[in-house]
Amino acid sequence: MDLADGPWPIDRHRTAISRDRLSAPMQALDRHGLFAEDRSVLDYGCGQGDDVRALVAAGIRAVGWDPYFAADVPLEPADIVNLGFVLNVIEDRVERREALARAYGLARQCLAVAGLVVGKGDTTGLQPFKDGFLTRRGTFQKYFRQDELGAFIAEVLGEEAIAVAHGVFFVFPDKLLEQRFLLERQQRREAAAVVPVGVGSPRRAERPARRQLDPAALAASSRQRRDDLLVYFALNLFARRTRYAELPPELRRDVKALFGSHARAQEAARELLFSVGQGPVIDAACRAAHEHGVGWLAEGEYLQLPTELLTRLPAALRCYVGCAAKLYGDVETAHLLKIHIRSGKVSLMTYDQFDSSPLPRLRERIKIDLRAQDIDCYDYSGRPAAPILYLKSRFMAADQDGYARQQAFDESLRQLGLFDFSSFGPEPERFFATLAANGYAVDERAFALFRRDRE
């Protein structure tokens, strides 16, 4: 039977699932500090309402509407609106557009949109139907490509869709909030508490700062803030956004204090953006980062580091990674970041037990190809042969939590002299078999190697 030839019963409500944690778009809103006591939240297409209950329990003014589970809830505007995994269950393209436009029309400050993406579900054995699939439960699912979902949102709403995760985008009716959000993504968080640049007059803020900080610390903080703004403006140019009139007042003050004018800031940002397409610039920046104790450098190949160290990178690398983030979303949701020096790619690695094990197993690898504007996902979850991250301390900074115990474990592993870690190291089965054959085992909870004959 050709399912496209006639009507087919679609039970959309059967796609609603129970959750024991916030959904991906709600997590993204929370991660970026967009939930607040003075902001209201509408979950448009809330399903069984688990997100709403969790937000209300946390003191957030949240309501949920759903055509099946909560049809009697009034649809009223809210500061934050979530349209989470709704578009992918609507089989009618016109209705899909209408749902997106209606949700956006209810959002005063920010709309979060999430959809299923290619590679995040198994379509084996499913019946193709329209631009998606019919499931065995009688539901419809469309799997979007990341760029396809972003382009669809932008085309329907006439606004930029900002990627914050794989399959999750924000759209801001409130343009000042949008610019504050974009700048916050580039800020060196350790610098934010040092000097309150941007609060009141820069000169007036400088005087009390000088009483509390030595000149070197003040100069370093100013350089960091200038880098933050350079990366912010460069990525705005990359996205073809932002008029000066849309900048928050506090940001205009910083621009004047650190650049002299908006035009000079734009010129410097344009130079930075154009430079990151040059291999020698990326190579030099990777070397500089490594020399300052940030990341592990494979000479001429890549720099690899924990994503939490991203804001310690030189401005050129932060801009380079920011271009990748425009395609993918928040790279900080992964554990490790790999900057490929020659291929124009950025890889993100997520591990099981990254912080609690000296030998974490790879769960997911994302490869972002900036030249092809493409994203590839590789899922390793549940595989016995999932690669192990060996010698994790070489990627860490000396002041990171857990560095000392990880370094001690790595050194004890090196001293065994049983393995070659010059590349990626042995496959897991051979690694543990070799340890056992030589009388050793790993206590992962204690971050320790021990001899079996001394148990």
Image: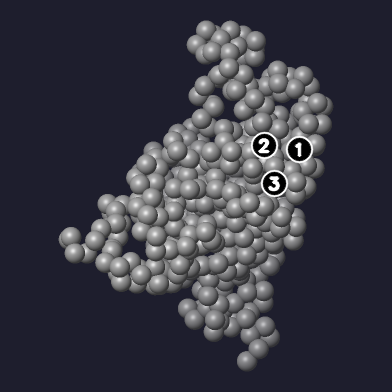
- Alpha carbon distance from label 2 to label 1: 8 Å
- Alpha carbon distance from label 3 to label 2: 13 Å
Q: Toward the viewer: 66 or 60? A: 60
* Residue at image location 77% in from the left, 19% down from the top: 260
Identify which amino acid the numbered label 2 is placed on. Answer: Ala
Identify which amino acid the numbered label 3 is placed on. Answer: Asp
How many residues crowd mark 3 within 10 Å: few (<14), some (14–19), many (20+)? Answer: many
* Residue at image location 75% in from the left, 57% down from the top: 371
Q: What residue does disc 2 label?
A: 315
Q: Which element carries disc 2, helix, strand or loop?
A: helix
How many residues crowd mark 1 within 10 Å: few (<14), some (14–19), many (20+)? Answer: many
Q: What residue does disc 1 label?
A: 272
Q: Toward the viewer: 153 or 4? A: 153
Q: Which element carries disc 3, helix, strand or loop?
A: helix
Q: What residue does disc 3 label?
A: 283
Colour mapping: one colour
Left or right: 254, with 308 as reference point: right
